[in-house]
């Protein structure tokens, strides 16, 4: 049953573009013995959802007349689509009582449910009502999977835009875009490295491991080097207590260097590079040789994960040098 392996949760659930599979609906269903009403639903599925999704984002909103949250979501969804001012975003409303075959194919278990379909594939979805800002962000993520509306930008512009989203901290948008690009360009190790970094920023360590497994061990692209360093760092953070507990330990004893060391790694993975540096530099300033120079070693690992030419790395490396050699 399509969509394969789909699971809709109470929060938006992304179906990774690299794992989705296109199904030929007309061929799969034509052999079935269908009533005239069911055949009409199959035709609507092809005409209104599958075919338009070849060059657009089709937002399939499943609803029912008896559903209160559906009535709350409807105007917000319509407004969000209209505000995009992009003809490549289309909304299709499916009443599950009138279209049980379509609802069954999407494995709908409750309403409202929204699925985004791109190029004949489900790529994202959510259950329940959402705020206007959440809906706009959801739509923006799907648009990132499409070429520019005017067709002027080439593939490199799409890659640059995806990495810009990653650098700006929008890991979800970056993961969606870079995942689609990695699927289309499996020989682009830099794209795969960026995809892995985005997954790590989302806490999806297993996904990052799987992505990097496709890259040769001797690959030296900067994005791959950074991704592998970040993955290694993420693997080392299983112990040491959670963030709140570590912060409480430091508040109680600022010289709890073990807590500072562990917290620095967690802050870096969470995107707070400055916070991570402050804790490690504080250890080095107080006791450069603590634990065999563990704070310095971790800071060097953070430099590798951020990239040797990254402005943060350059600035922080200077601060480290002043501490060690002044």
Image: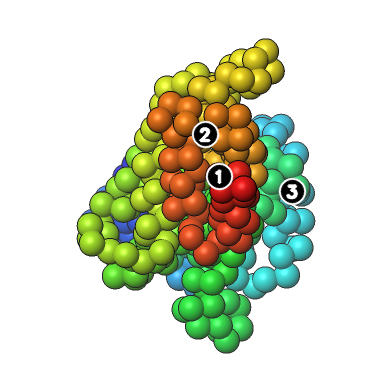
Going from N to C along the chain, the mark reached first, 3 or 1, is 3
Classify 10 Å Cα crowding around label 1: few (below 14), some (14-19), many (20 and above): few
From this view, report whether residue 181 is shown above or below residue 149. above
**What residue do we see at 74% from left, 48% from top?**
133
Mark 2 = which residue? 288
The answer to whether any part of residue 64 appears in the image is no
Residue 181: which quarter of the image?
A: bottom left
Residue 281 is at least partly visible in this image: yes
- Quote the CA–CA distance across marks 3 and 1: 47 Å
Tell me if residue 253 comes above or below residue 226 in the rendering. Answer: above
Q: Give the residue drawn at x 37%, y 35%.
A: 235
- Tell us which disc is closer to us: 3 or 1: 1
The one nearer the camera, 206 or 274, is 274
User: x, y percentage for residue 80?
Assistant: 73, 56
Query: Relative to residue 154, is residue 81 drawn left or right?
Result: right
Label placed on residue 133: 3
Element at label 3: helix
Horizontal placement of 298 versus 247: left or right? left
Label pair 3/1, CB-CB below 8 angstroms: no
Residues at marks 1 and 2 touching, judged by CB atoms closer than 8 Å: yes
Q: Residue at image x 73%, y 70%? A: 85
Q: Residue furthest front?
A: 326
Q: Position of residue 147 (x, y in %)?
A: 52, 75
Helix, strand or loop for disc 2: loop
Number of numbered discs visible in the structure rendering: 3
* Residue 208, above or below 223: above
């Amino acid at each position: 049953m399509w969509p394969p392996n789909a699971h809709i949760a109470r929060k938006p659930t992304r179906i990774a573009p690299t794992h989705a599979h296109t199904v030929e609906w007309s061929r799969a269903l034509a052999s079935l013995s269908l009533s005239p009403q069911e055949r009409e639903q199959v035709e609507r599925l092809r005409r209104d959802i599958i075919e338009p999704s070849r060059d657009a984002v089709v937002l399939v909103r499943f609803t029912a007349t008896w559903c209160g949250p559906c009535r709350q979501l409807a105007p917000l969804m319509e407004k969000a689509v209209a505000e995009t001012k992009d003809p490549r975003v289309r909304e299709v409303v499916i009443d599950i009582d009138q279209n049980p075959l379509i609802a069954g194919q999407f494995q709908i278990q409750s309403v409202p449910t929204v699925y985004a379909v791109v190029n004949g594939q489900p790529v994202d979805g959510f259950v329940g009502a959402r705020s206007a800002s959440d809906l706009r962000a959801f739509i923006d993520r799907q648009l990132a999977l499409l070429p520019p509306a005017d067709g002027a930008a080439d593939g490199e512009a799409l890659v640059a835009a995806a990495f810009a989203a990653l650098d700006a901290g929008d890991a979800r948008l970056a993961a969606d875009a870079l995942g689609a690009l990695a699927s289309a360009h499996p020989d682009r190790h830099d794209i795969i490295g960026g995809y892995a970094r985005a997954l790590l920023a989302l806490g999806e360590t297993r996904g990052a491991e799987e992505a990097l497994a496709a890259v040769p061990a001797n690959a030296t692209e900067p994005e791959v080097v950074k991704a592998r360093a970040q993955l290694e760092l993420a693997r080392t953070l299983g112990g040491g207590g959670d963030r709140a507990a570590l912060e409480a330990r430091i508040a109680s004893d600022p010289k709890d260097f073990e807590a500072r060391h562990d917290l620095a790694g967690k802050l870096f993975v969470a995107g707070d590079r400055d916070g991570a540096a402050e804790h490690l530099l504080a250890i080095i300033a107080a006791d450069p040789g603590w634990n065999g120079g563990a704070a310095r070693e971790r800071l060097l690992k953070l430099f590798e994960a951020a990239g040797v030419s990254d402005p943060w790395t350059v600035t922080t490396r200077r601060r480290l040098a002043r501490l060690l050699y002044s």
